[in-house]
Amino acid sequence: MSVREKDDPALYTKIQEQNLLRQYDLLSNCIEIGLKKGIEAFDKYTLWALNYAAVSNICQLGGRYREGPIRVGNHLPPHFHDVPKLMDAFFSLIHENWTIVDHPTTLAAFALWNLNWIHPFVEGNGRTARAACYYLICLKQGRILGGKKTVPERIREDRAPYIAGLQAADRAYEKGQYDVTELAKYLAGLLKGQLSEP
């Protein structure tokens, strides 16, 4: 059972908002587990669960990688056959660099960009990428963070620098580089804002 936006926009919006609340509750549980077990707890099953929570009742294919072509604006994500291996490489990069990269938002910025670039799910990629980003920020800080508005909420409120940061990372990748500096700086500012509003 799912509700389509074009059939009932008000109900769709209501369900989407309720899903975000459920996703945040699940995310908090995932962060608690990650804080106990370490970065290895961040895996495809965590992402699948977060995606499922984000798109319940609005997409029948939540919680699993896409198995068909997709286009997002001007971005043509990788072929769906490549998604599993790209996601394996994504997790490997995060795990292998966890103790090497000290900056609190660099790996979170990479996750935010790379998940949006791969677009591994049919629906809810942005919501899942923002949840993964926040997961990594909290793990780097060693705790679930306080503050009135979380980093993902702040991203939703001010999308222009978010989009600009993603596009900057896309341009770097087209030149054969991983460079999420702009996105990491943007996230650092949002994190500072969250922590300054208890």
Image (spheres, grey):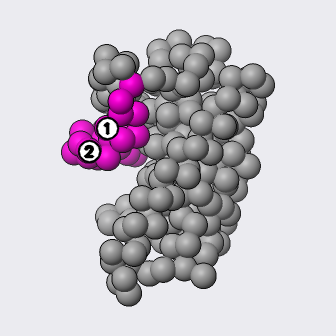
CA distance for labels 1 and 2:
5 Å
How packed mark 2 is, by other alpha carbons closer than 10 Å (few <14, some 14-19, many 20 or more), is few
From the viewer's perspective, tell me whether residue 2 is left or right of residue 152. right
Q: Quadrant of the N terminus?
A: bottom right
Q: Which residue is located at x 44 percent, y 63 percent? A: 16
Q: Which residue is located at x 58 percent, y 19 percent? A: 143
Membership of 173 in magenta stretch: yes
How packed mark 1 is, by other alpha carbons closer than 10 Å (few <14, some 14-19, many 20 or more), is some
Q: Are marks 1 and 2 in contact (CB under 8 Å)?
A: yes
Q: Which residue is located at x 47 percent, y 18 percent? A: 104
Residue 197 x, y percent position in the rendering? 31, 21
Any part of residue 194 in sight: yes
Work out whether 39 lies above or below 196. below
The disc at residue 157 is 2
**SS state under label 1:** helix
Residue 154 x, y percent position in the rendering? 31, 38
Residues in magenta? 147-176
Q: Quadrant of the C terminus?
A: top left
Work out whether 45 lies above or below 102. below
Quarter residue 75 falls in: bottom left
The disc at residue 154 is 1
Q: Say which amino acid is labelled 2.
A: Glu
Residue 150 x, y percent position in the rendering? 40, 33
| Nearer to the camera, 143 or 163 | 143
Q: Say which amino acid is labelled 1.
A: Arg
Q: Which residue is located at x 64 percent, y 15 percent? A: 99
**SS state under label 2:** helix
**Looking at the image, how many numbered discs can be counted on the residues?**
2
